[in-house]
Amino acid sequence: HPRMDINTTTEEKAERLLNGMPTNGHGGDDTMTVDDELLTLMVSCLCGGIKICVQSHQQALEAQRLGAVGVIFENSNGNKATALPHESLSIPCYKSLDDAFTIVQSEKDVKDLVHPKLVSPILVTSSQCLLAAVKDCLGASSFIPVFCAANNVEEAENALSNKFDGILLMNMPPKNEDMQRLLKVQCSIHGSAQLPDTLSFKKKRSAIGVVSLQGDYLLHEGRLREALRHFAVEDQFEVVRIRTPDDIKHYQNNDCLRAIVLPGGWSNLQTQLFRRNKLDEALTEFANSSRDKKCYILCVCAGWILARSRDGYGCEDRLLLNFFDTVIDNNILHGRYKIRLEPHTHSEEYTLFTDEEKASSNDDRWGIFSNAPVARNFPKETTEILARVVMPKSDERDGAVVGIRQGNFFGYAFHDGIHRPFVKTLITDT
């Protein structure tokens, strides 16, 4: 949902909230537009999330408070709510299931998923056995989440145990305890991360851990592996998932955890899951020990918000990890903006940008931002500014800092082109 102008009327805000995504996941041709790229990024951030069907504005507010990543104003019987959402809602709202998902009810629907412009999450409604078929169709490198429809918390628990990426609750949980129970189950299931058997400690491969409780961790896994292939160091590094303190200890005990990535996503939901799983404490311990070792942390968008030391706009109720000595303002940038890379940031490695942009005479590139943060009030003597956003001079956000480095910690508000420079740092410092 784009950040709305203060002059927008309540009715306009409600209508825009109700049109958070297109009515289907497919475009008319195979060319990805800026809107498609933005939607793809937003969709990837839904992994590990819960959407809820609601019947009133009050229920929508309660769903938002509980950490839902979206609400649908339609219940399990197909009845639509008559009241529009109020401007106080900050999560995406949808008129119907068709607006929120690409729906899969049969094997025929699975075959129709093969399309380069799939830019909405997938909802499996009829049979959990379709999950494997959907995953096979999307491929191992896909970061499109697959949700399961559940009529109650019991069905949701079963779906999570079958490794769906997210849950759609067809009805608002009758009690707050039910939602907390679901979050607890979500933590315990996501906490049983499959430690890869392929990781051979005899070969002394280093692990890059991606925190995978909620957010666009699938996207980061894919881009990190692409960066490892680019530098031909797949035999030296392995991308793994971090979901519990035990996962961190497992790799630390084998002296191979070189880096941790905190992904983008929903910082309010990540806050609940991190605290419930006690991952915040384990990450802080790793961060403190990394200062004296050749270990690094990459924090992106929501991950950067959680890693701040001081609250800015929209961060007051979020987890505060104190990795970066900076104020972070939340939900400042949404859309496609020019990024000015500082000369010392290995900008020649930002090869995910177009040839025209790489050939330009300055260090400006384009980046996609999804309700992204900016940094301010950081100590200049210990901070390297990696990137700024370029706006018209009349826009107060011109020059806002969207990428910094403080010691072994890297923070970015965008995803474009950041993984190769990060991997290059790991290689150079090996």
Image (cartoon, rainbow, N blue to C red):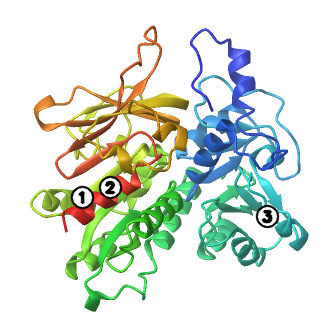
Q: Earlier in the sequence, mark 2 or mark 1?
A: 1
Q: Is residue 393 above or below residue 47?
A: above
Q: Which mark is residue 422?
A: 2
Residue ranking furthest to the bottom: 202
Mark 3: secondary structure: loop
Residue at image mark 3: 114
Viewer-nearest residue: 340 or 411: 340
Q: Is residue 366 above or below residue 322?
A: above
Expressed as whole percent of the image width and height from the top left, the position of residue 100 reads 75, 46
Residue drawn at (50%, 37%), measured in percent from left and top?
Answer: 357
Residue at image mark 1: 296
Q: Are marks 2 and 1 in contact (CB under 8 Å)?
A: yes
Q: Earlier in the sequence, mark 3 or mark 2?
A: 3
Residue drawn at (29%, 43%), measured in percent from left and top?
Answer: 345
Callout 2 amino acid: Phe
Expressed as whole percent of the image width and height from the top left, the position of residue 192 reads 45, 77
Residue drawn at (68%, 49%), measured in percent from left and top?
Answer: 52
Viewer-nearest residue: 68 or 352: 352
Residue drawn at (61%, 30%), measured in percent from left and top?
Answer: 89
Mark 3 and mark 1: span between their CA atoms?
37 Å
Callout 1 amino acid: Tyr
Q: Is residue 208 above or below residue 30?
A: below
- Quadrant holding the N terminus: top right
Callout 3 amino acid: Val
Mark 2: secondary structure: helix
Task: Tell which tag, 2 or 1, sits nearer the viewer.
Answer: 2
Mark 2 and mark 1: span between their CA atoms?
9 Å
